[in-house]
Image (cartoon, rainbow, N blue to C red):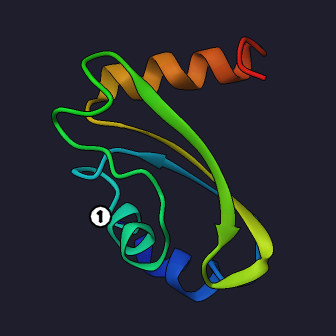
């Protein structure tokens, strides 16, 4: 997808928020390979459910990374809305 070349050059300099599904965001596969992040699959976490996870940025562990992930767009939308409304602590 367009825009990911830009991210490659900057991901080690910033705190990151990675949003998407393994099908729509290739950065998630890199994160899975470099960390012990919870891998989203068709079976887990389930339909309409997402995962929020905070980890060290694997490209610079002095930085943080927030993963907002799910298997489909519906789960990403629901999880993102809950996060922005402050429903998740």
Q: Quadrant of residue 82?
A: top right
Question: What's the residue at 21%, 50% (across, down)?
Answer: 23
Where in the figure is residue 72, as x and y percent of width and height? 26, 30
Tally of numbered tags: 1
Which residue does the numbered mark 1 point to in the structure image?
1
Which residue lies most toward the right here?
62
In the displayed structure, 11 sits above or below 46; it is below
Left-right relation of 26 to 78: left
Q: Quadrant of residue 75?
A: top left
Where in the figure is residue 55, as x and y percent of width and height? 66, 60
Question: What's the residue at 78%, 23% (across, down)?
Answer: 89
What secondary structure is found at the residue carrying circle 1? loop
Question: What's the residue at 35%, 56% (across, down)?
Answer: 25
Q: Would residue 38 be seen by someone viewing this image from the given angle?
A: yes
Which residue lies most toward the front here?
36
Left-right relation of 44 to 80: left
Left-right relation of 40 to 83: left
Where in the figure is residue 6, as x and y percent of width and height? 52, 78
In the displayed structure, 51 sits above or below 19; it is above
Label 1 environment density (alpha carbons within 10 Å; few <14, some 14–19, many ≥20): few
In the displayed structure, 7 sits above or below 8; it is above
Question: What's the residue at 33%, 29% (across, down)?
Answer: 45
Image quadrant in which the N terminus is located:
bottom left
Q: Would residue 16 be seen by someone viewing this image from the given angle?
A: no
Left-right relation of 58 to 24: right
């Amino acid at each position: 997808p367009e825009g990911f070349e830009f991210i490659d050059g900057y991901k080690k300099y910033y705190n990151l928020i990675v949003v998407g599904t393994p099908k729509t965001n290739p950065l998630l596969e890199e994160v899975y390979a470099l960390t012990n992040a919870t891998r989203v699959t068709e079976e887990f976490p389930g339909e309409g459910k997402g995962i929020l996870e905070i980890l060290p940025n694997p490209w610079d562990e002095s930085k943080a990374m927030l993963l907002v992930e799910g298997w489909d767009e519906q789960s990403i939308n629901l999880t993102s809305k809950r996060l922005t409304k402050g429903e998740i602590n």
